């Protein structure tokens, strides 16, 4: 499913917010880290040559807020400035390689780019991909035959048969000529001209019609037996066509190679089994296993070192045990030959919890990739990289001035009028807008912060673990030999001085307001080593919305300077990197397991502290996260997906999939009876106002206020709605009641 704005969903939520449990020991998954660095587990003692008093490292880099400050020189930090927050880098913990940021070479985007004058088109491509003067995008997704988004009908495969021919096991009719005619190859050549390091992978939306059980390239849907609302994809890959489909991929890779284009990976199939009428195909888990093995066998036979990415679908479909027979893909790895054949796991973000990427990476030791997303928010890129994604590929990012032309529909109508779909489908506000009248283009501001990643990182860069976002500053850090690259994001309206701690050395940098900034420097973290040791912290019990502190203490036989950190911090938890003092102001009742680390730069130790939070009401004036509800009605705990992960939401989460009759209750402690301002932070991507969407009710169920939810322009575009409410004094349960659905709730605040 391709929702123009993502609203990703969390799995398994309970009334308690758990910290994502980091692996208790280092090195659970260290896939394909072909690095010369040790990973920092305790090593034989090497005499320490690490000096502590050397001159400050020379830091280079730039920052962007948008077109107004694009790849601008880093500000200097005034002498004597104090740190607002700290980033701890732990080079002992190596994670995934970077493999790129970029976009799809879909035919809709290409056809729009080719409506520009040649000079303007070169200017656009240069701005997108040139690593010196542009954003430096470096990885691109090609489509093997037509995807759902094209301008020029009809949809096509590379093995279309003439009348009277019903099969083509020799692939005699194979041709990529349409890609040449439609300027796909020309566009790739332009990308290569401005970024010679660009890499390419490819996905098919379906096998050619004749390889399918229903002899149809586009999707065909039918109602699931017994359901009036749920559909399934009728066309399956024919069992006797698994091998020829694998050879079809080989032919495609060879054909592109003849044009000087190296396809370094394919996904096995885009969104297998998606119940849509645009090009799609069903393929059983068993067929996926056989196809994976056949693809790698044919690659080997033809001396292709092309990689195979499996899955290429939503987070949720990876692991949900209630998913359908086709989906629930981790089961394809039940076959050892398939595990060997697969080089990586590809994800789309339209459904489920992005933390699934980290889980899959840990569990199978294979790189994970975000192969299709419409989310331009650089905060999402940073977050997905922290969740171990190697790459981030945007989908269908060039439209005309009206948000067209493209052929996409969510209607399950096998006789859909594609001409009409093309006239009416509009996806406004994507990365590049081509004005077909003036033959000029414009880009969105997100391009420049995205360049703060792509301009600096290369496939030699390996992510190293670093501390969770704190003080409005989030980070992701990479290492290539002795060169470190940190991308820091400041989400606040004032500049922040950030202390960067690496192996006992610190430096202070300044991140401008609302900016993404990249810092590169050379460092030689210590390698000697006795690992530091953290002392256990006994379980503790604290009150919700009250402040409690405890201290982490660690010893180190080398007397190295130590830094304390956590990779994930739930709302209301903070750790001081130098003193180890943990401050709790929990917003959610229940049991939390908090994982902390200490590092000397060469190794780390980890403890988990169990904290029981006694429920108390939130004082007036305190923000109450929607996800911190005391009770709810209408959603299914555990299996349902209504606590959504979203980088645009406060606390990183919101409640979604609202429906009439659903409700959420919150505990609030009102010191004094009176009339208060109720702020509801909401988003609505339906394109229309939801009138009287929410009623706010007291513990007896009496309606205190009813409010509409405006059209906020997207599922992640939050706005505040204010309404006065009169409350009695005391610790009480207040309810947000969904009179209608069609909105997301981020938080409420009484003041
Ligand atoms: Ca040590
Ligand atoms: Ca929230």
Image: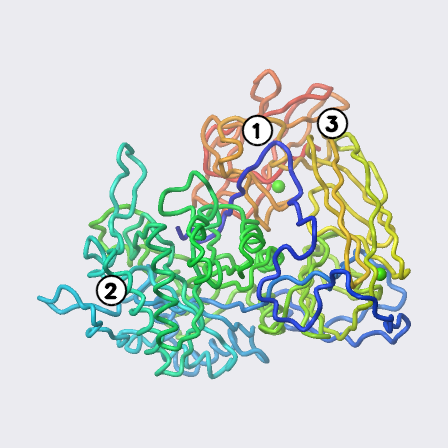
Q: Nearer the viewer, residue 169 or 196?
A: 169
Q: Mark 1 points at which residue?
A: 664
Is residue 83 something that shows in the picture?
yes
Q: Mark 3 points at which residue?
A: 614
Residue 577 lies, with reference to residue 43, above or below; the image says above
Quarter of the displayed picture in which ligand 1 can be seen: bottom right
* Residue for point 51% across, 61% down: 369
Q: Mark 2 points at which residue?
A: 153
Instruction: Determine whether, in the image, residue 596 is placed left or right of residue 366.
Output: right
Mark 3, mark 2: which one is toward the viewer?
3
Q: Earlier in the sequence, mark 2 or mark 1?
A: 2
Residue 148 lies, with reference to residue 643, above or below; the image says below
Mark 3, mark 1: which one is toward the viewer?
3
**Image x and y of residue 604, in percent:** 77, 56
Q: Nearer the viewer, residue 42 or 450?
A: 42
Instruction: Determine whether, in the image, residue 117 is placed left or right of residue 733.
Output: left
Q: Earlier in the sequence, mark 3 or mark 1?
A: 3
């Amino acid at each position: 499913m391709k929702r123009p704005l993502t609203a990703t969903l969390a799995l398994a939520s309970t009334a308690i917010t758990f910290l994502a449990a980091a692996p208790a020991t280092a090195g659970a998954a260290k896939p394909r880290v072909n690095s010369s660095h040790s990973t920092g587990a305790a090593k034989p003692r090497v005499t320490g040559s690490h000096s502590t008093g050397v001159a400050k490292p020379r830091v280079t880099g730039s920052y962007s807020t948008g077109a107004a400050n694009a790849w601008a020189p880093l500000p200097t930090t005034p002498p004597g400035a104090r740190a607002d927050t700290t980033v701890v880098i732990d080079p002992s913990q190596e994670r995934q390689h970077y493999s790129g940021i970029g976009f799809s070479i879909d035919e809709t985007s290409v056809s729009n780019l080719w409506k520009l004058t040649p000079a303007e088109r070169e200017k656009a491509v240069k701005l997108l991909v040139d690593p010196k003067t542009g954003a430096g995008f470096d990885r691109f997704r090609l489509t093997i035959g037509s995807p759902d988004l094209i301008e020029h009908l009809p949809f096509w495969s590379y093995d279309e048969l003439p009348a009277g021919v019903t099969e083509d096991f020799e692939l005699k009719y194979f041709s990529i000529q349409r890609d040449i005619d439609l300027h796909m190859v020309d566009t790739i050549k332009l990308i290569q001209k401005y970024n010679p390091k660009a890499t390419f992978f490819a996905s098919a939306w379906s096998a050619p019609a004749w390889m399918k059980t229903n002899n149809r390239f586009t999707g065909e849907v039918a109602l699931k037996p017994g359901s009036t609302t749920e559909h399934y994809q009728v066309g399956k890959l024919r069992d006797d066509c698994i091998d020829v489909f694998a050879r079809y991929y080989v032919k495609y890779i060879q054909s592109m190679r003849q044009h000087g284009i190296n396809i370094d990976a394919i996904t096995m199939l885009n969104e297998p089994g998606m119940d849509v009428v645009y090009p799609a195909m069903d393929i059983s888990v068993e067929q996926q296993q056989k196809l994976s093995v056949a693809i790698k066998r044919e690659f080997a036979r033809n001396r292709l070192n092309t990689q195979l990415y499996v899955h290429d679908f939503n987070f949720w479909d990876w692991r949900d045990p209630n998913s359908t027979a086709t989906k629930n893909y981790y089961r394809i790895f039940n076959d050892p030959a398939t595990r060997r054949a697969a080089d990586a796991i590809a994800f789309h973000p339209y459904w489920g919890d992005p933390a699934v990427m980290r889980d899959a990476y840990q569990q199978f030791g294979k790189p994970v990739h975000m192969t299709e997303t419409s989310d331009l928010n650089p905060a999402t890129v940073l977050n997905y990289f922290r969740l171990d994604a190697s790459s981030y590929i945007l989908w269908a990012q060039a439209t005309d001035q009206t948000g067209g032309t493209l052929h996409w529909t969510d209607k399950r109508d096998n006789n859909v009028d594609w001409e009409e779909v093309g006239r009416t489908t509009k996806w406004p506000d994507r990365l590049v807008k081509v004005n077909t009248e003036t033959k000029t283009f414009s880009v969105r501001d997100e391009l420049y912060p995205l360049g703060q990643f792509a301009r600096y990182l290369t496939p030699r860069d390996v992510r190293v673990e670093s501390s969770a976002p704190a003080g409005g500053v989030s980070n992701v850090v990479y290492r290539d030999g002795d060169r470190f690259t940190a991308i820091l994001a400041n989400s606040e309206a004032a500049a922040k001085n950030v202390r960067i701690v690496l192996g006992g050395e610190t430096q202070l940098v300044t991140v401008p307001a609302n900016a993404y900034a990249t810092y590169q420097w050379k460092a030689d973290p210590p390698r000697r080593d006795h690992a530091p040791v953290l002392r256990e912290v006994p379980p503790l019990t604290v009150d919700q919305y009250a402040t409690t502190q405890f201290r982490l203490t660690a010893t180190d036989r080398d007397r190295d300077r130590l830094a304390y950190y956590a990779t994930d911090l739930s709302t209301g938890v903070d750790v001081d990197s130098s003193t180890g003092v943990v401050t709790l102001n929990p917003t959610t009742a229940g049991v939390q397991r908090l994982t902390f680390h200490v590092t000397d730069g060469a190794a780390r130790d980890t403890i988990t502290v169990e904290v029981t939070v006694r429920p108390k009401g939130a004082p007036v004036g305190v923000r109450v996260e929607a996800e911190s509800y005391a009770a709810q009605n209408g959603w299914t705990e555990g299996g349902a997906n209504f606590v959504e992960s979203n980088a645009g939401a406060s606390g990183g989460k919101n409640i979604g999939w609202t429906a009439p009759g659903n409700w959420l209750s919150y505990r609030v402690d009102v010191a004094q009876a009176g009339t208060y301002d109720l702020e509801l932070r909401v988003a609505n991507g339906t394109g229309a106002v939801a009138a009287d969407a929410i009623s706010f009710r007291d513990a007896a169920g009496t309606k205190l206020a009813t409010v509409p939810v405006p059209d906020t322009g997207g599922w992640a575009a939050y706005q505040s709605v204010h309404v006065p409410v009169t409350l009695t004094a005391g610790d009480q349960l207040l309810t947000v009641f969904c009179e209608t659905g069609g909105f997301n709730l981020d938080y409420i605040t009484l003041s």
